[in-house]
Image (cartoon, coloured by chain):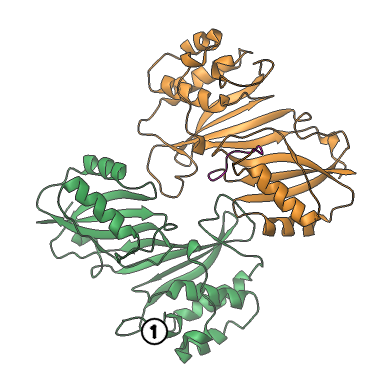
Chain colours: A orange, B green
Amino acid sequence: MTRYFLDISYKGTRYHGWQIQENAFTVQEALETALSTFFKKPISVMGSGRTDTGVHASMQVCHFDINYEVEKEKFIRSINGILPKDISVNSIRKVKADAHARFSAKSRSYVYRMVLQKNPFIEDFAWRHYFNPDMERMNTAAKLLMAHQDFECFSKVHTEVKHFRCEIKSAHWEQKDGELQFHITANRFLRGMVRAIVGTLVDIGLGKMNPEELNTIIESKNRKKAGKSAPACGLFLSHIAYSEDIYID
Amino acid sequence: MTRYFLDISYKGTRYHGWQIQENAFTVQEALETALSTFFKKPISVMGSGRTDTGVHASMQVCHFDINYEVEKEKFIRSINGILPKDISVNSIRKVKADAHARFSAKSRSYVYRMVLQKNPFIEDFAWRHYFNPDMERMNTAAKLLMAHQDFECFSKVHTEVKHFRCEIKSAHWEQKDGELQFHITANRFLRGMVRAIVGTLVDIGLGKMNPEELNTIIESKNRKKAGKSAPACGLFLSHIAYSEDIYID
């Protein structure tokens, strides 16, 4: 068997997230169906992690195994023809047999997009917000995130993780193309974590609390102390980092 | 009565075009409904021209009359709250009583967007094309358009216009942000004209005919001689030009 990594993108609007589940249409299911059609046998994929209902991915990575050599160009062209318009395969790379889309990932990055002006062309891709949060206050608070390890306060309550520790490597807001964008990278994320962080930082930006109160919220380990979750439509999984040595070609 | 011009944008995907019609949901209807809600009386609008089913507008202009002074900031905020997410009002300006969104327009501009790579995020906004047309050939042909006056060959067949004359002021292709974009400006356009021109120019770009054959097609006045219409999703009404002297403020 040969293991391959796929780099894919999707518009999450009409999907119930990444992960296969009964009675709901998911990105993983759409992808496995397309791969099984292409390879004429059942194919399962393992993603780097889940994304929730309505969340997008400009880069998601998954692996699958197949017992022959894939012709890359032909594969990319064909699979994109089989897949729906809102999912694309951007590249395929052969990896070592023990490389794992989830466990080999060194870090994940997300981008959250917010707009202050109504814009019909990005309605599916950004949180339209009516008030302008103060970037400096939000960035002061974002820097505080790096000093903490346990983020239970930003985790969905009924989740099956063993611990709530995450190593946040970077987190900052920037203004770009008329948008406010939040960029965050960590070794792992808890369910709902980025949207809860964004909602909390925006509250800070709007003056509902001081940047330093973020420390108190995090130390409380209580989801109710943090802000509301920002809407799913603004969130993009944007990068998954692996060591170069997992790739065979 | 005071006359106002509205500058609006819309994502045309779920609308049966601009113009009000029975048994179909249109942008004009959505806009008139919102305006009538805001002003608490029936309001009709007159657009600069129609757009077809699925066609977008980054700028469309329409006028309406009302018997009092509109508070602009409050109006813009409220009307955008009432309108659906895929239609926005960008600005409102008071104009002279005889200014007319359709008859005062000096020129209209359209942009047509084409992409060669599958991209889930612009699937609603561009024609995904599998072959790369030659830009130089397409631009050679686009220049020839300016030498003609009668464009019946690019007009939908059952249309009620009195004549097929258009004065094309500019028409060219450019590469931008990984897209092929066609920009065209004229005093007026016939129904289906831009999409028929794009389809024909792409055929020329792909070598199905020579740029000079465009002259023969135009002289034939026969829609069947021209290329297929490019899909609606790639087309944007992008600008309507008026003399500055129609505006009161």
Residue B106 x/y as whole percent: 29, 69
- Please give the residue where the numbered disc 1 appears in the rendered image: B149
Residue B165 x/y as whole percent: 35, 83
| Residue A20 falls within the magenta-colored stretch | yes
Q: Which of A49 and B7 lies nearest the eye of the viewer?
A: A49
Q: Residue furthest front?
A: A23
Above or below, B85 against B231 in this view is above
- Chain letter of disc 1 in the image: B
The residue stretch that appears in magenta? A13-21
Above or below, A26 against B160 in this view is above
Residue B17 x/y as whole percent: 37, 64
Above or below, B164 against B67 in this view is below
Q: Which of A74 and B189 lies nearest the eye of the viewer?
A: A74
Count residues near mark 1 (Cα–Cα under 10 Å), then give few for <14, some for 14-19, many for 20+: some
Q: Is residue B177 left or right of residue B28?
A: right
Residue A111 x/y as whole percent: 57, 34
Q: Quadrant of the N terminus of chain A?
A: top right
Q: Residue at x 16, y 55 (%)?
A: B42
Q: Residue at x 50, y 69 (%)?
A: B172
Residue B77 visible in the displayed image: yes
Q: Is residue B223 left or right of residue B78?
A: right
What secondary structure is found at the residue carrying circle 1?
loop
Location of residue B44 (image quadrant)? bottom left
Q: Which of A181 and A86 lies nearest the eye of the viewer?
A: A86
| Residue B15 falls within the magenta-colored stretch | no
Q: Residue at x 50, y 17 (%)?
A: A141
Residue A212 visible in the displayed image: no
